[in-house]
Image (cartoon, helix red, strand yellow):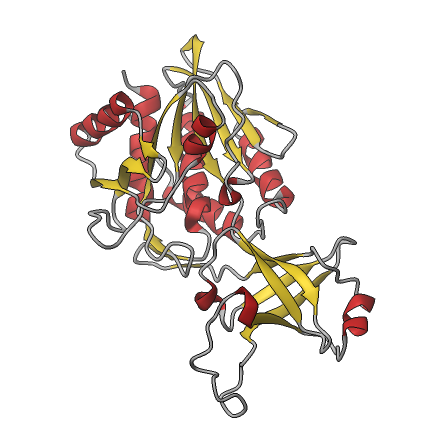
Amino acid sequence: MNLVFDKQYVLDFAKHLLAIDSPSSYTQAASKMIQQEAEALGYKTYYNQKGNLYISVDGENSEQTIALTAHFDTLGLMVRSIKSDGKLAVTRIGGPLMPTLDGEYCRIYTRDQKCYSGTILSTSCAAHVYKDSAQLTRDDEHMEIRIDEVVNCADDVKKLGIENGDIVAIDPKVEILENGFIKSRFLDDKISVSAIMGVLHALSKANQKPKCNILVMLTSFEEVGHGGCWIPSHIHEVLAVDMGCIGLDLSCTELDVSICAKDSGGPYDYEMTSKLMKLAKALDLNYAVDIYPFYQSDVTAALHAGHDIRGALIGPGVHASHGMERTHYNAVEQTMKLVAAYICMD
């Protein structure tokens, strides 16, 4: 295998994708961007009813198809109710760490295609006013959105077209540094999507095929638990590419590709995991094998849905998951090398 990965392509793609708001269910703009790029590389695409994007890659052996999966939906918020003073109460989409959202900018998307800016704040947001401003718990019940419009009551907000159930997207604050660090919310899992696209770009430019057909399944509801619960019936092997965890007794760093042996859904397929470890060793990759205690992937969702598949999980090491995340291009590159080896080498 002699694929060459284009670092600038991967970083440019990641920067573009990370900047597109896509909380679970509000993913159409992100999926369209990925679809257009995949088709520009020469691959066929289609969607299922829930909005998952599928990219078909022809292989040397057309009698077998294995799947790669990652997700482009992100954490976010939704308008729970409009308060009497014109602030917005919120409910979480997925599991963002609410304390990290205090003071973050956001965008409110209405059902009639309007977009308003705002700021997520504690309900005791002013140190000069509220005695408990520093101590108040930052959670759904004690945080709200201040809209950047002149609104003084619920009726003022409703006149803007804002309603209960509107999507609230959190500013990702994307920064890609010259030293290789990538800082942004929602690297989980847009950086893995970028890694897969980097592999597809390399295959396309080299006019090279994987050993068998590949179906790339990019899902739109992973953060709420059911992104990968439906899989085409001809798929029996799925490699999930999702963020690697960092912290406590885990050995992964922001420079590594992580191989997950077990998460909260149980152990991953022993043979697949062993093969990934063997490939990582043979290629002299920076890799770690870890257990993720509070984690589930699209493979887990598919298994829980009753699919007869075997699955494994890898991904670039990402620090501070569900908060202000960070990784390094080295981890992305190690992930691309392992994905490419898995689909191209026996």
> Where's residue 80, x and y in %?
66, 61
How many discs appear? 0
The answer to whether residue 201 is visible is no
In screen coordinates, is 74 left or right of 182?
right
Image-based side of 67 in relation to 293, left or right: right
Q: Position of residue 76 (x, y in %)?
A: 55, 55
* Residue at far top of view: 63
From the viewer's perspective, is 121 left or right of 174? right
User: Image point 41% across, 41% down: which residue?
Assistant: 192
Q: Quadrant of the N terminus?
A: top left
**Is residue 214 something that shows in the picture?**
yes
Residue 151, above or below 247: below
Q: Position of residue 45 (x, y in %)?
A: 58, 26
Classify 342 as above or below 190.
above
Q: Nearer the viewer, residue 232 or 39?
A: 232
Q: Residue at x 49, y 39 (%)?
A: 71
Q: Identify the residue at horizontal 31%, vertical 29% (top origin).
A: 268
Q: Is residue 303 left or right of residue 275?
A: right
Classify the position of the C terminus by image quarter.
top left
The percent position of residue 59, horizontal first and vertical second, equals 43, 15
Residue drawn at the location 45% of the way across and 36% of the way down: 70
Residue 10 lies in quadrant: top left
> Observer-nearest residue: 123 or 341?
123
Q: Nearer the viewer, residue 162 or 18?
A: 162
The image quarter containing residue 50 is top right
Q: Nearer the viewer, residue 73 or 125?
A: 125
Taking the view exactly as shown, the residue that stands out farthest to the bottom is 128
